[in-house]
Structure formats: C-alpha cells, structure tokens
Image (cartoon, rainbow, N blue to C red):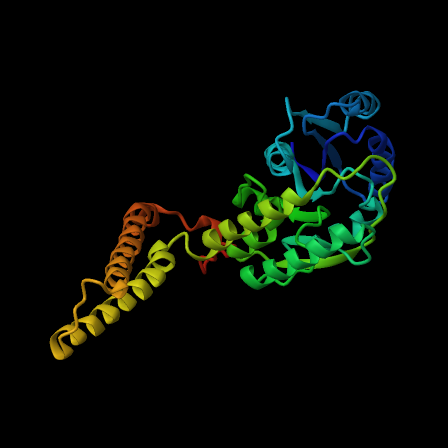
Amino acid sequence: MNIDLSVVVPVYNEDNNIDPLYREITSSLSSLPKTYEIVFVDDGSNDNTFQVLKEIQERDKRVKIIKFRRNFGKSAALNSAFDFVKGNIIITMDGDLQDNPEEIPSFVDAIEGGSDLVSGWKYSRKDPLTKKMPSTLFNKMTRLLTGVDLHDFNCGFKAYKKEVLDTISLYGEMHRYIPALAAQYGFKITELKVKHRPRSYGRSKYGFSRLIKGFLDLITVKFLTEYSSRPLHVFGIPGMISLVSGFFIGLYLVILKYWKDVMLSDRPLLLLSILLIILGLQFISIGLLGEMITFRERKDASTEKYIEAILDGQNDNNI
C-alpha cells in the first residue's frame, strides 16, 4: 500500500543521536496531514545503534529498519531504502542531528509546488574549516562539470518524487550526484536553504578519502551524463589530436629528409611521430568499439525514462 511520505535516514554508529532525531521527525510530521513511514538504514554499526532502533520500532510501527551486515557506504544504504519505501514523496536526511527535521514541511511544499527534486543547501554550515573548504572546492567543480546550478551537492537533506528514484540507480559514492543524474532525464531540480546544526554526539565518519572518491565519481558522472551514448566523442577527440599531431610531425620529417637530405635515424621526433600516430589510432579504435557495443543498446533502448506525459489528442489521457 502506497503512503504519502517516506523519511529515509542512513545511520552508522549514531546510537546517541537516533532517539532525539526520531522524536524531532515525528514532531515535524505531526503537522502534516499525510500518512508516513520512517526508514532507518543501519549501515553495519558496531555500537548500540540497532538496539536503539529496535526499541523505537516497538513503540512506533511506522518505523522500519534495514540492517546491513557490515558498512557498505551511504549510496548502498540509500539505494536499498529507495527500493523498499512506499511513499510518493521521499525525504532523505543524515542521522547525526545536524539536519533539522523542522524543515521537512518546506521540502514537501516545494515538491507539491512542482519540483521533482529539492536539494538542501546548508547556508550557514556548522562544520570546521577543514570540512568547509574542500566542500566549497568540490561543489564549484561539480557545478562546472555537470552544469547543475546547486551550491551544496553533498547535503543529505533532500526530497524526491518517487519517479525520480525509480529512474536512476546508485552505486559507489554516487549519492552525491543524484541531482546531476536526475537532470540528465529532465527532472525539475530546485534548491532550498536549510538550517545546519553543530554535531552534538559522536564524530564525523568522513575523512580526506571521501574527497578523492568524490572527484573520481565526478568523472564517472560526467562520462555517464555526457558521453555514455556516444563513446567515440570522448575517445575520438584525443585520438584525432594525437593522430594529426603525429602526421604533421612525420610530414615535417619527410620534408627534411627529401628536401634537405637530413638523416632521421637519430632524431627523437621520428619515434614521437610514430608513437602519436599509434596512440591516435588506438583511441579512435576504442571509441569505435564502444560505439559498436552501445549500438544494440541504443537500438533497443526505451525512452520511457524521458517521457513525462503522452496526450493522444482524443481523451487526453496522461501516461
């Protein structure tokens, strides 16, 4: 049975934060005339997180729990919850009490106002400078490469229509780029300033390695959103540059050989020309192989993910 609203909270070693967070969520949702569920995903916690969750569920059957055997990461936690939830609107938020559940009605209003995805913006972020500076750099690069104009891609406080999450899939650390993946399919994305609170209990689970993984996944997202259906464009451009450069270097050497009688056997440019030509041919060949692999997929691919409605002109049924 579908319900109106699902709140998804991935948690990892947050036993002190869960109960106050649950109380704040239910207090906020009580002001909404909607049916709801709260889904906690225990991402392999090794403290008392799961025990606290079970105690809460005994008091409130609207609370659902998904428990992982070990820590698989936030993307896996969110993806499992997205497959499980029944709400027509899905709210995601972090389990560290830094997101304020009082903001939930504002997200719901934005979705009901016509947005498909609403992304939070921690406008006054309560984190140390060592977290804020890399985050600022990361967000600027993400805006530049994806073309999605958001200030805070990594904010866990977001709201979605269910069809958005039915369209995309997550893996690795791709949860940061849900807006970019959704924009690929033409969904309407808006941003909402949210209050951000300092952490009261526990410590952050993210270190410097998150920044490296984030940039690597950004390259993946750029490829998936821009070149997944035309691999020759991404491999062909450097291939052509390499091939043309090698050709003109070789032409220059031929002119030296036959017009000025210059010996070429000891010229490094000869090896460079051959290398560039070979590399260029290899890049172009890889691109063509990619085109051959994706040809059948493109031929048989359905466009349903891109369609918002179909009007037949007679009974105006939306599909």
Instruction: Judge whether 279 appears above or below 256 on screen.
Output: above
Front in this rendered view, residue 311 or 176? 176
State whether residue 235 appears in this view.
Answer: yes
Q: Quadrant of the N terminus?
A: top right
Query: Position of 191 compared to 220: left or right?
Result: right
Q: Considering depth in this image, is 72 or 238 the residue closer to the camera?
A: 238
Residue 176, above or below 258:
above
Q: Is residue 113 visible?
A: no
How many numbered marks have been drawn onto this rendered protein structure? 0
Foreground pick, 237 / 10: 237
Q: Which residue occupies the foreground of this view, 122 or 167?
A: 122
Where is residue 140 shown, x and y percent of the image? Answer: 64, 61
Residue 261's spot in the image, x, y percent?
Answer: 13, 75
- Return the x and y of residue 239 as percentages of the image width and height: 31, 60
Q: Position of residue 294 (x, y in %)?
A: 33, 48
Q: Eyeballing the image, is 26 above or below 190?
A: above
Which residue sits at x=29%, y=68%?
Answer: 245
Taking 103 as reference, is 41 left or right? left
Tell me if 237 is positioned left or right of 35 in this view: left
Above or below, comparing residue 241 to residue 87 in the picture: below
Q: Quadrant of residue 94?
A: top right
| Quarter holding residue 136 | bottom right
